[in-house]
Image (spheres, grey):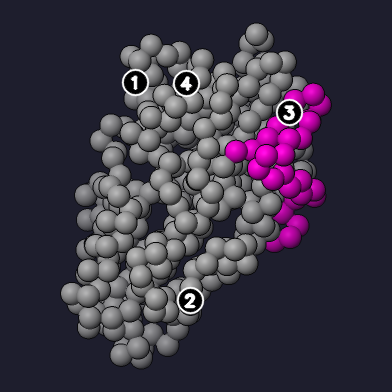
Amino acid sequence: MIRPDLLLHPTPKGLYCPPGDFYIDPVRGAVDRAVVTHGHADHARAGHGSVLATPDTLAIMAARYGAQFTASRQPLAFGETVNISGVSVSFAPAGHILGSAQVIVEWKGLRIVNTGDYKRRTDPTCRPFEVVPNTHIFISEATFGLPVFRHPDDRGEIAKLLSSVRLFPEKTHLVGVYSLGKAQRVIALLREAGWDSPLYIHGALEKLCTLYQSRGVDLGSLVPATDIDDKARFRGQIVLAPPSAFAQKWGQRFADPVLAFASGWMSVRQRAKQRGVELPLILSDHADWDELTDTICDVDPEEVWVTYGREDALVRWAELEGRKARPLRLVGYEDEGD
Ligand SMILES: [Zn+2]
């Protein structure tokens, strides 16, 4: 078997594949050829010569950066394979956000799978994570790569929000959500839980919610949250906005608000407190500790490479399990959609 770092190795610009001459999620500067796992800003940047990604990810990048975000869009659907100078590249669903993919790179009998960001829980807005069999090198993200991170059931978190709405019908519930992925997932989970009324959204969420709907994700009736000074209109309602909006004038005009925030980091009490969040909702689009370790066992690779987050604990865990493991020390990734 060839040495795996001949096929993929870390560089300051991101993971580089010398035989295929492409980068996966290049993080610094423009490159000729990029393979992009998903649309979050730290993974998907504008200006590359060509971008190979799933059709949904390309649509997300075009919506965020404009149609000219790359000179050449190369859509690759799940299940299809493309040959780049003898390296075969394909995608498997990652379950992180709409369009999110694990990248499968194969060359001379060696198969490397890079998860990008991923989670294992069901998410009504994207395809579930798939275990890729016969993986030699498994590159795992580690955003929540510490044993203290164990995310509760997401339906339970949504139930908390809805019981607060029932308990305080005179108040407006303001829910902080990141604009790509989290917003649409929270909306879809609210719909699943039976919330049929219109949901009010900040203008910064409109474009991506419309895009999700146009790509077949049903979010129900969404209404722009304008005319905030009409206090009665928002009593008993749920308003979603990027977390930063609630600190601005816009967010401070709601009468009797209850401030909620949907994020994996809400399991850290101090973070909720710092932001003045009264109703922390622990909803993450990343694997928690159990999902990370279970997934490594499910994939059962010959070697684990750990990146995008807290690398050391997961490397240590893998070694204690008798697995070969190494941290990749890639820099520049700070996920916008935790
Ligand atoms: Zn992400």
Distance from disc 4 to disc 2, alpha carbons, whole Å, reads: 43 Å
Real-space CA distance between mark 4 and mark 3, rounded to the nearest whole angstrom: 21 Å
Element type at mark 4: loop
Magenta stretch encompasses residue 79:
yes
Q: What numbered label is drawn on residue 88?
A: 3
From the image, state whether disc 4 or disc 2 is nearer to you. Answer: 4
- Residue topped by disc 1: 317
Q: Name the residue under label 4.
A: 300
Q: Specify whether residue 25 is in view.
A: no
Instruction: Check if mark 1's residue and mark 4's residue have beta carbons within 8 Å.
Output: no
Q: Cα distance, mark 1 to mark 3?
A: 31 Å
Kindly state the secondary structure of the residue where label 2 is placed. strand
- Pick the residue in front: 131 or 149: 131
When the figure is inspected, residue 52 is found, relative to residue 14, above or below; the finding is below
Quote the CA–CA distance across marks 1 and 2. 44 Å
- What is the three-letter code of the residue carrying label 3? Ser
Q: What separation in Å lies between label 1 and label 4 (alpha carbons)?
A: 14 Å
Q: What residue type is labelled 1?
A: Trp
- Of the residues shown, which amino acid type is indicated by label 4? Asp
- Where is residue 111 drawn, in percent x and y? 63, 22
Mark positioned earlier in the residue sequence (1 or 2):
2
